[in-house]
Amino acid sequence: MKIHYKTIVVSDVHLGSDGSKAKELVRFLKQNTADLLILNGDIIDGWQLKKSGEWKRKHTRFLKIILSMIEKHNTKVVYTRGNHDDFLDQILPFEIGNFSIVKDFYYESFGKKYYVVHGDIFDSITSKMKWLAKLGDVGYTLLLWINKKYNNYRLVNGLPYYSLSKVIKQKVKSAVSFISEYETKLSEIAQEKGCHGVICGHIHSPEIKDMDTGIKYLNSGDWVESLSALVEDFNGDWDLVYYNEVESDKGITRLHNREINSDNEMILKSVI
């Protein structure tokens, strides 16, 4: 059963990196379509491709599914530049048909105005000390490699995907503090721009929350760890949906039903 939304937002796919869950995202987009698809930065990982990354067939399939959505569903696709795909600065702004690439933009829906931006420009480490960010990227890549091996074991034993880095972010005080500061800073920027909300990515931490300032903060997460997306229905309501894989006795099965988990987050379980 396919679901058609008003808007779908995905970010941080990191095509070209070993940790990219491009195959899972293609499956997700085959079953979930929209009038507007926002690719909110770090879709292509230029940093990894320059270093040790590899462009695989599954990464090309993702680009093909985007073209298919434009052709079959007349989907408008807006790609905002992130820090890992900063090579796009050379062609910004770019527009052809229903596809455009921008640095940031405003999205208006049901009387609400949202500031859409990847989020890295507000991170002093990536904007002013890029070499330090790339050093941190090395450690993150190692953590993802460990996470991949661990989840291969879990999949074989019929267990759902488990994000080690997500747990670390939730446990380490400095990480929790950084995320809180990030949310506050982006919300303040959105307020200064006269917006009702901000739609971002970058920190791989999916979230929907109403800030004390009245600004709605929406983070689409990523397709490396969280496998999450933001979706807007035709009433203007936003939800976070997640993709999870488990292996059953009959092989892998795809489900498309929403559940409320213990954290009261809306989850879309998509299992093949």
Image (cartoon, rainbow, N blue to C red):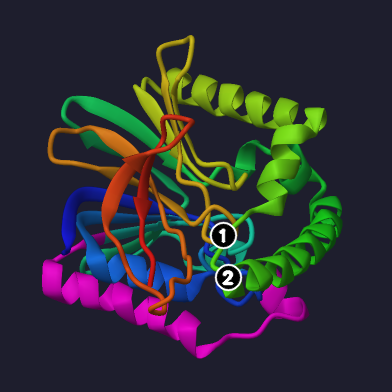
Q: Residue furthest front?
A: 249
Q: Position of residue 202 (x, y in %)?
A: 59, 47
Q: Which mark is residue 107?
A: none
Q: Position of residue 189 (x, y in %)?
A: 51, 25
Which residue is labeled 1 in the image? 161
Q: Position of residue 59 (x, y in %)?
A: 49, 80
Q: Quadrant of residue 193?
A: top left
Q: Is residue 71 above or below residue 194?
A: below
Q: Nearer the viewer, residue 184 or 115?
A: 184
Q: Nearer the viewer, residue 87 or 126?
A: 126
Considering the numbered disc 1 on the image, is that residue within a helix, a strand or a loop?
A: loop
Q: Is residue 131 left or right of residue 148?
A: right
Q: What is the three-letter code of the residue carrying label 1?
A: Tyr
Q: Quadrant of the C terminus?
A: bottom left
Q: Is residue 102 left or right of residue 127?
A: left
Q: What residue is shown at x 31% (from left), y 77% (from top)?
A: 65
Q: Quadrant of residue 36?
A: bottom left
Which residue is labeled 2 in the image? 155
Would you say the magenta stretch is mainly helix, strand or loop?
helix
Q: What is the three-letter code of the residue carrying label 2?
A: Leu
Q: What residue is shown at x 48% (from left), y 41% (from top)?
A: 200
Q: Is residue 63 left or right of residue 88?
A: left
Q: Is residue 46 visible?
A: no
Q: Is residue 108 above or below residue 105?
A: above
Q: What residue is shown at x 34% (from left), y 22% (from top)?
A: 196
Q: Position of residue 243 (x, y in %)?
A: 42, 58
Q: State yes or no: residue 116 in magenta.
A: no
Q: What residue is shown at x 58% (from left), y 85% (from top)?
A: 55
Q: Residues within 10 Å of mark 1 (few under 14, many from 20)?
A: many
Q: Residues within 10 Å of mark 2 (few under 14, many from 20)?
A: some
**1 and 2 marks in contact (CB < 8 Å):** yes
Extent of the magenta region: 47-76
